[in-house]
Image (cartoon, helix red, strand yellow):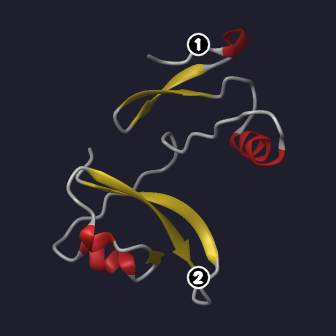
Amino acid sequence: MPLRPARGAGRQVDAVRGLCHARAVQTGVLQSHLHTREQTCPSLFAVLPMGQLRVTGADRQRSLESVVVGDLQVLGSGKAKLILITNDQGGILHDCYDCNGLT
């Protein structure tokens, strides 16, 4: 069941497996991110509506492991795992989810 829009300002967006409630208040992605990270009140920052990339090929998990932190080769079909994209020094550039077989 989707969340009800706060004061009518929310909207539904297509997500990986159905609809996702996004932006319950009129803010942009950056403002939502900062609110979630800095405020003391409860807040959710949904990553589902953001960019998605499909990687194909026999060695896709091994190839992805060269740029992320995470053992992707043991990820079962239909499962997802939070992983980190790192730079050459091991610093975190971004977090993302690896979804094996989810469409």
The N terminus - image quarter: top left
Relative vertical location of residue 8 with respect to residue 17 in this rendering, above or below: above
Q: Secondary structure at mark 1?
A: loop
> Could you tell whether 17 is left or right of 4 in the image?
left
Distance (Cα) linking label 1 and label 2 = 39 Å
Q: Position of residue 56 (x, y in %)?
A: 23, 65
Residue 87 marker: 2
**Is residue 72 or residue 31 the one in the foreground?**
72
Say which residue label 1 marks. 4
Residue at position x 63%, y 40% from top?
45
Q: Amino acid at mark 1?
A: Arg
Up-down relation of residue 37 to residue 65 (above or below)? above
Which residue does the image show at 46% across and 75% down from the upper left?
A: 68
Mark closer to the chain start, 1 or 2: 1
Q: Position of residue 10 (x, y in %)?
A: 63, 19
The total number of labels drawn is 2
Report whether 14 appears left or right of 100: right
Say left or right for 61 vs 42: left
Q: Residues within 10 Å of mark 2 (few under 14, many from 20)?
A: few
Query: Residue 75's x, y, as percent?
Result: 27, 64
Q: Residue at coordinates 62% horizontally, 74% vertically from top-left?
A: 92
**Residue 63 sits in quarter:** bottom left
SS at badge 2:
loop
Give the vertical position of 103 relative to 89 (above or below). above
Examine the rendered structure and indicate whether residue 30 appears above or below residue 41. below
| Quadrant including the C terminus | top left
Q: Tell whether 27 sits left or right of 87.
A: right
**Quarter of the image where one finds residue 3:** top right
Instruction: Please identify the residue farthest to the left as the structure is shown.
Output: 58
Residue lying at the far bottom of the rendered structure: 89
At horizontal 42% and vertical 73% (from top left) the residue drawn is 70
* Kind of residue at badge 2: Asn
